[in-house]
Image (cartoon, coloured by chain):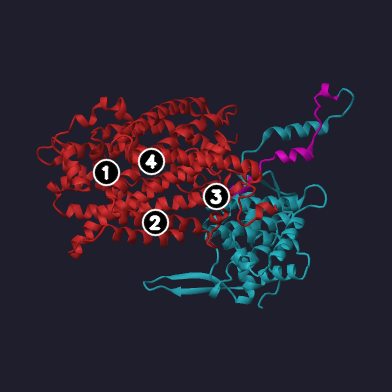
Chain colours: A cyan, B red
Amino acid sequence: MPSAEPTRLTDDLWLAAHDGVKGARLIGDWPLGVGLATGLLAELVHGGFLELREGELFRTQDATAALPSDPALRPVLVTMQAEEQTWPAPPVPAQVRATAHEEQWGPRAWERGAWPPPVQQETRHRRPGHPLNAWISYLAYDSRAEARVLDRLSRTGLVQREEHRRLFGGTTVRYVPFDSYASGTPANTITHAVQTGRTLPWADVILAGLFLATGLHHHALATLSPYERSLLTQQIQTGLTDPVGSGVKAMLRELLHAADAAIGEAAMR
Amino acid sequence: MSAPPSVVQTGISYALARNRLGPFAIGSAIASSVAPLTVITLVVPLALAATGLLGFPIAIIAVAAILMIYAVGYLAMARHIPNAGAFYAYVAHGIGRPFGVGTAWFALATYTSFQLCCYGAFGAAIGAPLLSDWLGFDVHWFIPAVLAWALVALLGANEVKLSGYVLVFLVIAETVLVVLYSLAIMLTSGFTFSGAAMNISDLSGPSLGVLIVLGATSFAGVEQSVVYIEESKDPRRTIPTATYVTIAVIGAAYALASWVQISAAGPKPIDRATAEGADLFFNEATVMLGHAAVTVGKILLGTGLIAALLAFHNAIARYTFALGREGVLPRLFGRTTIKGAPRNASLAQTTLALGVLILYAIAGWDPLVQLFYWGSTTGGLGILLLYTLTSIAVIGFFTGNTHGENLWQRRIAPLLATAILLAVAYLAIDNLAGLYGVTPGTGPARIVPIALLLIFAAGTTWGLILRRTRPDVYEGIGRGARSATASTSGLSAIL
């Protein structure tokens, strides 16, 4: 194996989707694009760079402080940041917060205009966010997500570039997994973990969910028996349920929902 | 309500808009299932012969006007419901889920009759004459029809869609050909426009219903524009623009070409249409353009029919797939291949088509009149009734919740459309015998309304049974991919 570092969730999805003969692609362009887009967003959410609330994505303090060095994730955040620059600035809240901080609170604070007090934690929800569906479509079209993932995968050496001369000039370029071991490993890891009763790490839970959403499970999870399939279902359910309240796992669950709907609706066209 | 997306053209929305479909692409996609050349060369003469009415051009203008009013509410509602491509989603959201299931079955029957009738036209009007010409012996219409069937079966099972460029080329070529031939016929010496074809008094009494059904047949397919709503640059502007412009352009081309065709047929157009049938339009053009015009026209008619066959086949397969996915039809139909083609649904339609073709061949029924004309007219009647149902559903949907649409879009236009559609639907059903060209109370005039009513009633009953036995499936009717039980992968059930 040429890879020196562990592959990431979205890389695994790309490899598993190209597990056909001679690296042939197993699913359509749109399901793959949506799957890869969701995978990248899931990595960002899990890494604490993005938060997902009610169908909108928000960059967190972490993402503002330091962008990740990852070659696939960084451009996504940079594009989001650039996008935010073009938004009209919301003028009113800044004004309210500034005056509210200077005011002394007292029994008759409302008469001096210090009421209501600053509510920073709650007002955060009312910031403009990036619409999730638009971002999934944006990353899925034109193979934008795939380009990012291939960029990252090429550095691990798990994919190779193949050039074909065409009959009348020009060359076509396509990327294929390094070998069938590289492309088969992601699905095997999940299958093996389920069969031996081990708990799946978060990335494999999302990957299994994306297999189902993209239809890749017909291929990747074909060797599971019905009982093992129900075990996997339980693993996905527990893997996407936060121990307390709603946190990262609820966001990941919403992401998978969005991917499933985006692929399902495209089947009607 | 969110701000209109066109106000701030940011990087992402700009890039997305470039990837998505504009009004031109959507317009040509819907026009391909409308198949302009088929209507002019086949529907017009056959309708003349069967009904004995000359008012086709004026009917086209009337139907275009009705459709424009109808489309206002239809498009407004499409922005607020999931799975907007399907009539039953409207009825399920607007009137109630049981009626939604009834509408779903009804719509399937309607589209199926449209598709099957195209096989008859392809076999008898194009395939058989051309093949007989080239091979030198008589070819039965069944052979080219089955060849077309095999092609559609193969392409449909893998959900191969003609690429956008091919569709645009075919549709533009057809429309240009219709307009060019019409001009050629107009330049023939001795041509004068016939006043009888534009006589507004045809639009009264019993003949109105008949003519409106013929018009609805000609426009069937324009309702497909909302399928592309998620794929459009701007749902608030692209889809309405595409729909209205397509209705206007096609309506103008139809009205001109059918008027010219009827005018050029001489003093007794109905006798000539009966004698020459599908060749009437081409024969008229031959006077000016020579015999090559017929061959070119027939080849384009053939490709146009194949495109329409494929478009209807894919529409039926998707419809069946959507119903199977929601659990309304057997789940079997809700499965796709790993590449996303709804293969089971497609194969079911293919089998049905072959069965009907064999039945017609063995029974020796006329493929042009009894398959194409009766089939397309049944489809036209079905579409008219579906427009009426969805128009009522639009009123129901906007009652009590404005969804941010203005009074014209959610109240006035749908009420107006519903009133007109109800009136013409009543007239059409009242004059079915005239429509099919048969004695009242016999043949299709008797069977078709009973069959359509039975299908609708059976579907509605099935919806009521689902409410009792499968509440989870019932809840998801008309919700498409967002139904809790819809995903064949089972992912949404897990989540």
Residue hosting label 3: B329
Describe the element under mark 4 as helix, strand or loop.
Answer: helix
Give the number of the mark in front: 4 or 3.
4
Q: Is residue A17 left or right of residue A197?
A: left
Give the number of the mark in front: 4 or 1.
4
Q: Which quadrant holds residue A180?
A: bottom right
Cα distance between the residues tagged 3 and 2? 21 Å
Which numbered disc flags the more N-terminal residue, 3 or 1?
1
Q: Nearer the viewer, residue B410 or A116?
A: B410
Q: Nearer the viewer, residue B438 or A1?
A: B438
Residue hosting label 1: B40
Residue B447 disc label? 4
Residue hosting label 2: B355
Give the number of the mark in front: 3 or 1.
3
Q: Residue furthest left?
A: B189
Give the number of the mark in front: 2 or 1.
2
Q: Amino acid at mark 1?
A: Ile
Give above or below for B150 relative to B453: below
- Tags 3 and 2 both on a single chain: yes
Cα distance between the residues tagged 4 and 3? 25 Å
Q: Chain of mark 4?
A: B
Which numbered disc flags the more N-terminal residue, 4 or 3?
3
Cα distance between the residues tagged 4 and 1? 27 Å
Q: Amino acid at mark 4?
A: Ile
Give above or below for B445 relative to B164: above
Which numbered disc flags the more N-terminal residue, 4 or 2?
2
* Magenta residues (range): A109-134
Q: Chain of mark 2?
A: B
Q: Is residue B88 visible?
A: no
Q: Amino acid at mark 2?
A: Gly
- Tags 4 and 2 both on a single chain: yes
